[in-house]
Amino acid sequence: MPGSAPGNNPTVKGDRVEIVIDAGDGVREFEITARRAGRRVETTSGRGVVEVTELTRTGQPVRTARFMASRVVAVVEHPFADGAHDAERSSPTGKSSLREAS
């Protein structure tokens, strides 16, 4: 957004987002990735909820993950490098991209 201070952008777009949450007995990590070429991952927060959504090129939501903001320890965005080929963006396995990191 024009005129916004860095880090104040309520919407973050990228190809992969890592979320670290406090699970009470430790932390749990989740990774949300754009599974197909042309898709993007968008992160928003508001009203006590952090929401990560995979969107198509036209902006249609494909899948959404929601986390309580009070439990979120970190949100790390890994954007796709501009100028790279779309073939590199696609998931080689085609498996679900919302997974708990080990």
Image (cartoon, rainbow, N blue to C red):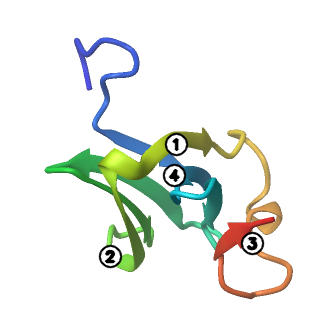
At 52% across and 53% down in the image, what residue appears? 21
Q: In the rendered structure, which disc, 4 or 3, sits on the residue that comes first in sequence? A: 4
**Does dot 3 land on a helix, a strand or a loop?**
loop
**Three-letter code, disc 4:** Asp
Marks 4 and 3: which is nearer the front? 4
Q: Nearer the viewer, residue 9 or 73?
A: 73
Frontmost of labels 1 and 3 is: 1
Query: Is 95 on the left or on the right of 32, as rendered?
Result: right
Give the labeled residue for mark 3: 90
Q: Which residue is the site of mark 2?
A: 60
Residue at mark 4: 22
Instruction: Work out how far the residue at label 4 is from the one at label 1, CA to CA, in angstroms.
Output: 12 Å
Q: Which mark is first along the chain, 1 or 4?
A: 4
Residue on which the image places disc 1: 75
Between discs 2 and 4, the one toward the N terminus: 4
Quadrant of the frame with the C terminus: bottom right
In the shown orientation, is residue 84 left or right of residue 69?
right
Sequence order check, earlier mark of 1 and 3: 1
Whether tag 1 and tag 3 are in contact, CB under 8 A, the answer is no
In front: 58, or 65?
Answer: 65
